[in-house]
Image: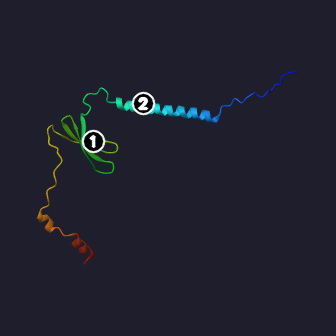
Amino acid sequence: MQAPLFAAPAASTTPTAGGGLFEVTLALLAIVALIAGLAWLMKRARGFGVAGRDRIQVLSERAMGPKERCVLVRVGATEILIGVAAGSVTKLHVFPEGAVTHPLAEPPPATSSTTTHAPSFKALLMRSLGK
């Protein structure tokens, strides 16, 4: 007797879905962890071997608009006022070495002559309403 031409396999050789999914997930997590570790290492090693790392200091900054800022920086002993916008950085003023750029104290109080001559809000409102 001859053997049949198309015999069915003795056992199923298809992999189970659970085992393959676990291996793929584990490999993906390992790759993501490797990328995160390399990013952390590059961040830590960026300034490695650079002497005088704190040569640029931001002394003060003030928002001038939604995307514009004025920034006072110190580079070495020189202080520079720069304007920072969405797509540009512009040097506004360079203070000479040793210039005093401390923040101003409280503004001087208004003199009594300016406060006595200025009409009150109530008086302006009544005048605009015609009363």
Q: Which of label 2 and label 1 is nearer to you?
A: 2
Quarter of the picture containing the C terminus is bottom left
Task: Give, as a three-letter code, the residue at label 2.
Answer: Leu
Provide residue 50's location: percent of width, then percent of height: 28, 27
Residue at 14%, 68% (x, y): give it.
117
Residue at 65%, 33% (x, y): give it.
16
Q: Residues within 10 Å of mark 1 (few under 14, many from 20)?
A: few
Please tell me whether residue 126 is drawn above or below residue 43 in the rendered image.
Answer: below
Which element type, helix, strand or loop, lies under badge 1?
Answer: strand
Residue behind mark 2? 38
Residue at 25%, 36% (x, y): give it.
56
Please tell me whether residue 71 is drawn above or below residue 32 in the rendered image.
Answer: below
Query: Left or right: where does residue 78 sit relative to residue 1?
Result: left
Residue at 22%, 40% (x, y): give it.
80
Residue behind mark 1? 90
Q: Are marks 2 and 1 in contact (CB under 8 Å)?
A: no
Provide residue 22's location: percent of width, then percent of height: 58, 34
In this view, the residue in front, 101 or 8, is: 8
Considering every residue shown, the one lying at the far right of the view is 1
Task: Give, as a three-letter code, the residue at label 1.
Answer: Thr
Query: Left or right: where does residue 8 sit relative to residue 23?
Result: right
Q: Residues within 10 Å of mark 2 (few under 14, many from 20)?
A: few
